Image (tube, grey):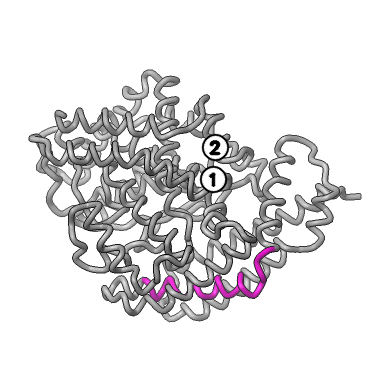
Amino acid sequence: MSTAFDLIAQHAKTTWALAQVMGRLGWDQETTMPRGAASQRAEEMAALEGVLHARRTDPRLGDWLEAAVAPDAAGEALLRHVRRSYARNTRVPAALAAELARTTSMAQGIWAEARARDEVAHFLPVLTRVIALRREEGEAIAQGGTAYDALLADYEPGTTGDEIGAMFDRMRPRLVALRERVLGAARQPAPLRGEFNHDGQMRLARKLAETFGYDFARGRLDLAVHPFSSGSGADVRITTRVAETDPFNCFYSTIHEVGHACYEQGIDAAYAFTPLGEGVSMGVHESQSRIYENQLGRSRAFTGWMFEAMRHEFGDLGLPDADAFHAAVNRVQPGYIRTEADEVHYNLHVMMRFDLERALIAGDLAVTDLEAAWNDRFKADFGVAVDRPSHGMLQDVHWSVGLIGYFPTYSLGNVYAGCLMKALRADRPTLDDDLAKGNLEPATGWLRDRLQRHGGLREPRDTIEHACGFAPDETPLLDYLEEKFAALYDL
């Protein structure tokens, strides 16, 4: 006879599998779905969300959870995830969950059209609806608490908006001071110029993915407007984008998404079809994508290898040597686009979005005033006026699909990555020699063993502390940035 724990595990297995199917529908929507299928897909997503919501709120779960006894630490973690999901989802009416799925599926297509047309007005009505629905959901989950914190917990359990805000307040002065020193430096590296054909970029993108350990037998690389990674276990897909005058966009988007994908591919197979079989939080997930992309991928050692790989694919790059190439890869320039931002500016982009979305959910900022608020804040933070909406509030997909509370996890991931890199260098003193040869296994193997294979076994901060051997904070990241860019800019 099955125990209460066995019944929960069996129920979780089917729920997890259905959630993966829904994720695959989302991947298809952003890559290969016909444009005319948007309204049908919205209904499909709403129907599947209804099924998932019913499973996540099944009254039997409450009874089983009261009686369940975990057989081991992994079982305790499974029960923790199911309890959290059950408590959250039983507070959200089924009709609201389905309407959110339907509206965000439609909103994504409308956002893409508005972005292509640089027409904010086309997007505002559906964005207003998305924000209202997510606020309603947050209030239902919070039950008198802060709606934004309830939504943030979907992406980073165990933290609050106030804690994130305090961390950002500590980070901002050092980031701004570093930016001012860099932009005022006498030495300003030359950029990479020229045209780099589409096919060549995709060939090298695949090579980079394999170099960083991505398993194409369990994944694929496609194109999307906004690069992303999707899936878990044996089906983990990544996307990138190509601009023929900006190959770094393609290459570092690919490496970034490979970091996400390798986390999912690296999780212990014994956790498959359970809540432990996927990344524990978006902050921890971002720690993997950002350490792959930045601390490893933009390091002087690895860019030396990449310089030769690009010359082999494209011929002369117009840069004299690997040092100039490394400087071009890490060139600091104010820019509109978060995903293309250098390491000095990136967190400032996130901080702005965090403040704006908190104000939207709190009701302190109307959606109709969002464009003006974005443009004013961008000019104040970056000293540049937004020239068009696709470079402003229409650039990111997140708000259209209801991902409120997601943005701060990008910077939290950077903070975690800084801690992981400090620990990695202490354990791998020959790391730069390996990176210079294009050998990523000593680094990615360390991350797989220390962090990735454990999936959702521990809470997010505990996951990082277990991997590093010390509690995470922002100091290692800021120290890394100041040391790196002081060297690059002769500060």
* Image position of 143 (left or right of 469): right
Give residue 241's quadrant in the image: bottom left
Above or below residue 283? Residue 353 is: below
Q: Which residue is mark 2?
A: 461
- Give me the C-alpha separation between circle 1 and circle 2: 9 Å
Q: Secondary structure at mark 1?
A: loop
Residue shown at the point (31%, 48%) measured from the top left: 348
Identify which amino acid the numbered label 2 is placed on: Arg
In the image, the segment drawn in magenta is: 91-111
Asked if 386 appears above or below 169 in the picture, the reply is below
Q: Is residue 181 above or below residue 406?
A: above
Q: Decide whether residue 240 is among the magenta residues.
A: no
Q: Secondary structure at mark 2?
A: helix
Viewer-nearest residue: 152 or 455? 152
Task: List x then y, in percent, for residue 18.
Answer: 64, 62
Crowd class of label 1 (few under 14; some 14 to 19; many from 20; radius 10 Å): some
Q: Residue at left 47%, top 69%?
A: 131
Q: Which residue is mark 1?
A: 159
Image: 74 above or below 17: above
Q: Position of residue 162 (x, y in %)?
A: 48, 48
Tell me whether circle 1 and circle 2 mark residues in contact (CB < 8 Å): yes
Specify the amino acid type for callout 1: Thr
Frontmost residue, 273 versus 74: 74
Residues 132 and 33: in front is 132
Check residue 95 for magenta coloring.
Answer: yes
- Residue at (37, 38) in percent of width and height: 170
Residue 94 in which image quadrant? bottom right
